[in-house]
Image: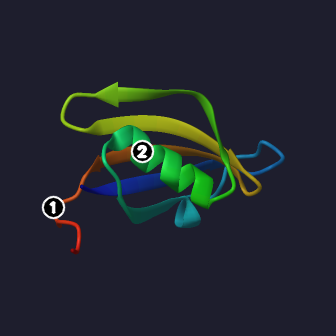
Amino acid sequence: MRFTIEQRHLTDVTGKPVSEDRALSFHACDANDADDAVRLFVGGHSAEVIGNVLRFPGFQAIATMRSAEGVFTLQVAPASQQMAR
């Protein structure tokens, strides 16, 4: 299943808020479920999940990620595209 991951940059490494012009990006990820999508995305960015992954009905999830660039929230939802085979 293909997922869209909305990555919102919250703070930089010093804990200061990030300016709005570069705070939001979108990514695609192929995974079995929303948990796998979070795990694959976080692992691919050499990051770690802070706290728990919050799961919602319909293959959706929200997580907080910390990496060398700062702290981010991730919102995971099914994408309209199918996986390429």
Say what secondary structure mark 1 lies in.
loop
Q: Quadrant of residue 85?
A: bottom left
Query: Which badge, 2 or 1, comes first in the chain's sequence?
Result: 2
Please report the residue visible at 42 percent of the width from the left and 36 percent of the height from the top. 62
Q: Position of residue 14 (x, y in %)?
A: 84, 46
Q: Residues within 10 Å of mark 2 (few under 14, many from 20)?
A: few
Residue type, numbered disc 1: Ser
Q: Residues within 10 Å of mark 1 (few under 14, many from 20)?
A: few
Residue type, numbered disc 2: Asp
Task: Identify the residue under disc 1.
Answer: 80
Please report the residue visible at 78 percent of the width from the left and 42 percent of the height from the top. 15
Label number found at residue 8: none
Q: Is residue 45 above or below residue 59?
A: below
Q: Position of residue 75 (x, y in %)?
A: 39, 44
Q: Position of residue 56 (x, y in %)?
A: 28, 28
Horizontal placement of 9 versus 46: left or right? left
> In the rendered image, is residue 15 in sight?
yes
Marks 2/1: CA–CA distance: 18 Å
> In the rendered image, is residue 8 in sight?
no
Say what secondary structure mark 2 lies in.
helix
Q: Position of residue 8 (x, y in %)?
A: 51, 51
Label number found at residue 36: 2
